[in-house]
Amino acid sequence: MTTSSIKRRRSPHAAPASNDGESLENDNDNNSSRTDSSNSRALPNNRISISNMSKRDSEEDSWASKGYSYINPFVHRIQIDDHIEVAKIYVLTVLLLPIRVVGCVLSLLSAWMFACIGLYGMSMEELQAKPLSGWRKLMQYWTARAMRMVYTSGSFHYIKMKGTPATSKEAPILVVAPHSSYVDSIVVVSGHPPSIVAKRETADIPLLGRIINYAQPIYVQREDPNSRQNTIKNIVDRARSPEDWPQVVIFAEGTCTNRTALIKFKPGAFYPGVPVQPVLLRYPNKFDTFTWTWDGPGVLRLLWLTMTQFYNRCEIEYLPVYTPSPAEMADANLYANNVRQVMAAALDVPTSDYSFEDVIVMSRAREMKIPFPGDIVEIEHTLDALDLLDSKRDMELCEKYLTLANPENLDIITFAELLQVDLKNPDLHKLFALLNHRHKGTVSLKSFLVCSLFCKLKNDEIIEFLRALIKLYSESSEKISRENFTRLMKHGGSKMTEQKTQTLFYALDPDNVGYVSFDKFVQYTEQQPSYKFLYHKSEHIRRTKSSKATPTTN
């Protein structure tokens, strides 16, 4: 089943959020009182409930709404309410953490030493020309063992292995999922060391660069326009070579999730059309202190909480080798989707229409201070289902926004009338619920309009998005006050800091008349190199696709 089919209404008894959040200003200015429970609807069932250790990644009031519940694979929260567990973490921070850090460092140095010995006298060309053998192969094994000790020192004492690992001839590629954190690389060092696909720059990382080189990775050179084709060719050449090349490990999701669903697999592992072995990762621990997602705790907090547990467990399951059919060999996306279905069934989790590209969209929404950036993709799909993405209704509402009575507290009847949508339409109710931030039965028209315009213009220049928002903040584009100019510019991206905005306003208003025009703002910034980002199109961001055309998976 898809993400869209796994949803439920928020309980009417659920506690409301601490902030209003119905207006965009509240979303941006009242972030300090938001609790992490705001995203409980997006968490896996085995999450921990840690209030005094929760991470505040957002400058917004909230990343995601709470009015409508669905699986968001990019949100993770850690909460530990048990005072005994909290006390244990602080005690182990003093007694155990220093020992573990020393153990990790010593293990890493040992792995680096083994790698240096094994690479002695070898050039990069020789390393890529043929697989290692003899004593160099043995040193490669000991390098992997030393790296395994890094994880052991860091609390991962137990790895449960299930299934039968295939040989490199049976399956040249290992497709690993779900991908949820830096810990997932434990699959590389838990057995016979496979290769990885890595950026060429990783070879220059201190310590780790030598270790990665010794794994004989397939390097991707991003400056090479033929990089993807060369990578595929290298994988195919290794797969068909009579020599004993190591397998290649690929995390097919392409980004970290919270393991509540398998998002779309990137097709890179499937272009070669060779058999793959699906590999599942599970972490059956009391606390999930290492999941590293788009919206969640940072890596340092995760490392601290992970290394202050007595131990953590990991399960690696090797599924049977998947041999592609002729149709799958001809269509990498079909191949990827079918392998994902097999892995999702084995994990007993749903598949999701979300992809790595959706993370890019959410990140851009967060940068531009869009309400509920964690929900923006779901909001976009709902707008598409309502045929509002091709409608000019939002622009019409922008024109009259400042003349409307109480636009920040619309009930669903008024909301339906303003959008000119049938009140009985279930997608209208879904959109209303997504925007119903405090579960008070009202939504903010401004929040809706900002979200709607972002979904339409996310590929366009930022300046065009700002132009579309003018009437939400000022009666006239010719006379924008300093206060309203500051409010408008907060949607200009992270480079438009408040200090930079104030400096820009005074540059546009040298006579101190108290207001500026938008056209003057455009004329000025067009000539300034430091404002080029306002005129850059984000062509790399996923373009809107009709949700009606999206096939449903099971």
Image: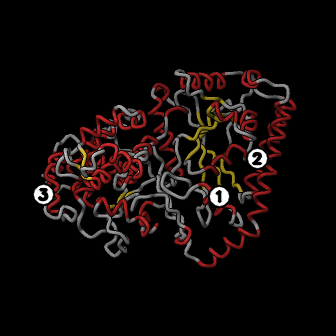
Which amino acid, by three-letter code, is at mark 1?
Leu
Which amino acid, by three-letter code, is at mark 2?
Met
Residue 266, position in %: x, y? 49, 36
Residue that carries the numbered disc 1 in the rendered image: 303
Residue 474 visible (yes or no): yes
Which quadrant would residue 120 be assigned to in this image?
top right
Left/right placement of residue 90 relative to residue 471 reads right
The circle on residue 403 is: 3
User: Distance of mark 1 from mark 3, alpha carbons?
Assistant: 52 Å
Q: Residue at x 30, y 68 (%)?
A: 439
Mark closer to the chain start, 1 or 3:
1
Mark closer to the chain start, 3 or 2:
2
The answer to which of 503 and 50 lies nearer the viewer is: 503
Mark closer to the chain start, 2 or 1:
2
Left/right placement of residue 209 relative to residue 223 reads right
Residue 549 visible (yes or no): no
Q: Residue at x 47, y 30 (%)?
A: 332
Residue that carries the numbered disc 2 in the rendered image: 147
Q: Which mark lies nearer to you, 3 or 2?
A: 3
User: Distance of mark 3 from mark 2, alpha carbons?
Assistant: 65 Å
Q: Which mark lies nearer to you, 1 or 3?
A: 3
Q: Is residue 523 above or below residue 29?
A: above
The number of numbered badges drawn on the structure is 3
Assign a secondary structure to mark 2: helix
Q: Is residue 74 above or below residue 532?
A: below
Q: Which mark lies nearer to you, 2 or 1?
A: 1
Residue 60, position in %: x, y? 40, 59
The answer to which of 163 and 237 lies nearer the viewer is: 237
The answer to which of 368 and 452 lies nearer the viewer is: 368
Label 3 crowd (10 A; few <14 / some 14-19 / many >=20): few
Which amino acid, by three-letter code, is at mark 3?
Thr
